[in-house]
Image: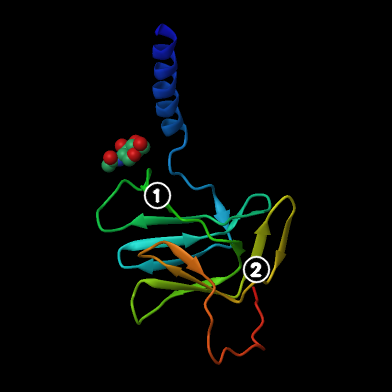
């Protein structure tokens, strides 16, 4: 019975410790893209030094003030690919869907190499879902670009 308490204490203590260590602080990055959705400023991907393309999605909620020394970052559902050198834009139709266009898409596996897996990715900020949209009349001569 006593060992059960030890295990419980360890689990509680270590989870608190985990929480403290893993604060929501994004690593410094470059080549990311960002879009304002309502009061949320989203940041997509980017290159984490020295060369690690990120599939992370972060946002800052700008609806209330905060101390800029400790911005309250939130992480959202990661992208299916690492993403650098691209651009993002908000759909004016629903003001919640974000399209990522062009850029370099990176398959993050054992080795990191980039390819142009899709020219466009779609992010539903309401459901945090990523899809590759089927776009009718998409000009297939459009090549992904930096
Ligand atoms: C902002 O945070 C920094 C670091 O924690 C602290 O030194 C500073 O006093 C804070 N400023 C305000 C206005 O709370």
Residue highlighted by disc 2: 104
Residue 62 versus residue 56: which sits nearer the camera? Answer: 56
* Residue 113 location (% of width, % of height): 73, 60
- Please identify the residue farthest to the top as the structure is shown: 2
Label 2 crowd bin: few (<14), some (14–19), many (20+), radius 10 Å: many
Q: Quadrant of ligand 1?
A: top left
Q: Which quarter of the figure is the N terminus placed in?
A: top left
Which color scheme did the rendering employ for the protein? Answer: rainbow
Q: Is residue 71 above or below residue 126?
A: above
Q: Residue at x 58, y 70 (%)?
A: 86
Residue highlighted by disc 1: 73
Label 1 sits on a secondary structure element that is strand
* Residue 117 location (% of width, % of height): 66, 71
Label 1 crowd bin: few (<14), some (14–19), many (20+), radius 10 Å: some
Q: Is residue 35 above or below residue 27?
A: below
Residue 139 versus residue 134: which sits nearer the camera? Answer: 134
Q: Which quarter of the figure is the C terminus placed in?
A: bottom right
* Residue 111 location (% of width, % of height): 75, 52
- Tell me how far mark 1 sits from mark 2, CA to CA: 25 Å
Tell me the quarter of the picture where residue 37 sits.
bottom left
């Amino acid at each position: 019975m006593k060992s059960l308490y030890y295990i419980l204490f360890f689990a509680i203590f270590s989870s608190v410790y985990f929480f403290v260590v893993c604060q929501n602080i994004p690593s410094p990055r470059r080549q990311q893209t960002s879009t304002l959705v309502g009061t949320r400023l989203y940041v997509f991907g980017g290159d984490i030094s020295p060369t690690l393309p990120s599939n992370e999605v972060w946002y800052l909620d700008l609806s209330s003030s905060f101390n800029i020394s400790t911005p309250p970052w939130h992480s959202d559902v990661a992208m299916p690919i690492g993403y650098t050198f691209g651009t993002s834009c908000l759909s004016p139709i629903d003001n919640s869907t974000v399209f990522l266009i062009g850029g370099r898409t990176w398959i993050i596996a054992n080795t990191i190499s980039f390819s142009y897996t899709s020219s466009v990715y779609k992010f539903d900020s309401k459901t945090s879902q990523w899809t590759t949209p089927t776009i009718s009349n998409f000009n297939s001569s459009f090549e992904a670009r930096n």
